Image: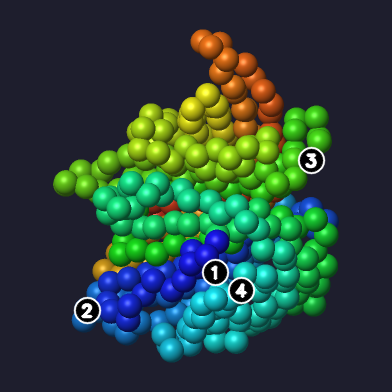
Amino acid sequence: MDGLNDLRWNGGPGHYEVWFLTFSDRGSNTGLWIRFTLHAPVAGAGEPHCELWFGAMHPDGLRLARRARYPAAGLRAEREPFRLHVDEAELSARGSAGALDDVRWELRWEPGEDPGLPVHPLIERARLARTMLVIPQPCLRIEGTVAIGERELRLTGASGAQAHLWGTKHASSWGWAHAADLQTAGGEPRPGDWLDAVSVTAPRLGREIGPSTSVVGRILGEPFRGNAPLSVARARAESTLTRYAVRTQAGARRLVLETVADRGALLGVTYEDPDGELLRCWNSEIATLRGQVWDRAGRRWTLRETLVAPGRGCFEYAQRAPIAGLPMHVGGT
C-alpha cells in the first residue's frame, strides 16, 4: 500500500484528485460513500478548491447527499503514515472521521496488505490512461458509528474499500462495480475475497474508444488480475443505468459478473472536469453483484463457484448527457 494514497497534485492547473471510501453495513442495510476531492481548473478557469462529499442510501428509498467546498489550502496531505485532511475531516490508513452539515462519522479498520491496481503498469507507463485508479485497501472490515441527523448507525458487519484516483479528465462514460462482502450462492461467507471491475469509454484520435475493461480482485483465496492489455482488450462489458455486466478471463480463470442496482436508490452526482465539462454519474452502494467463477482444465471449462453480494455491492454508471427524470443530488444539472 506504500505510496498509493500519496497526493499527486503539483500545485498546477488542469488536475483533479479523489480519495473515496465506499461501504455497506449488513446490520442496517445502509450504503455509504465518503469522498475527499481536489479540483484544479485549467489556467484561467478559476481557483483550485477541495470538497468533502457524503452520501447514504437505503432500500426503503433513503437517498441523502451532502457536499461542502473549501479553498485548496483546506486540503492537507501527509505521507508515512498516510493522513489526509479536508477542513476538519480526516482519512488515514486506519480510519476516517468527520462531520458535514447534519451528518458525522467515526470509522476505524485494520489496514490490509493486498491492494488493487486496475491500471496495468504497461498502460500506466504508456500514458494511455487520462485517469489513474488505485485501490490501496480493497477489502475493509469497518467498525464505528455514522450519525445522520438524529439517527445513529452503529456499524455491524460493514465491509467496503478505499480508493484513490487522479487525472486531467474523466472518461466519457463508464460502468463500475466493487464487492468486498462476498458469499457463495449457498450463503457461505468468503472472507478476504473481493472484486473490482471498471469499463471506460474515452475519446482518442477523434473518436470514442471502448469500453476498455479491467477486473482485479481476490477470488476463492487467489489473486485475479484481469488488467493486462490482452485481458482488457478481450473483455466484454455492457453498462446501463441500472445494470453492469462483464465477461473476462485471466490465465485459466474466467469471471462472468452482473451487478444490478435499484433505480429508486440511485444517488445522482455531477462531476466537473478541470476544463469545465460536466459528467453525470449515478451511484449505489446497495446493489447486488453476482459472479460465476469458471476454471479451465485442458480444453474444458468448469463452474467452480458462484459468488454473490446481495444488496452489498457498489455500482456506478456515468455518461456526459443528463437523463430526463433523474435528479442530481450533488452538483445539479
Can you tell which of label 4 and label 2 is closer to the viewer? 4
Quarter of the figure with the N terminus: bottom right
**Disc sitting over residue 189 in the figure:** 3
Q: Nearer the viewer, residue 185 or 3?
A: 3
Check the image and report above or below for 267 versus 216. Answer: below
222 or 312: nearer the viewer: 222
Residue that sits furthest to the top in the current view: 299
Decide which of tag 3 and tag 4 comes sooner along the chain. Answer: 4
The dot on residue 92 is 4
Q: Position of residue 318 (x, y in %)?
A: 43, 51
In the rendered image, which residue does mark 1 sit on? 35
Q: Tag 4 or tag 1, which sits nearer the N-term? A: 1
The location of residue 264, given as percent across then percent down, is 62, 50
Circles 1, 4 touching at the beta carbon (< 8 Å) = no
Q: Secondary structure at mark 4?
A: strand
- What amino acid is labelled 4 in the image? Ser
> Circle 2 is placed at which residue position?
43
Q: Is residue 116 left or right of residue 288?
A: left
Q: Residue 38 location, x and y as percent?
A: 42, 75
What distance separates the C-alpha of mark 3 from that of mark 2? 50 Å
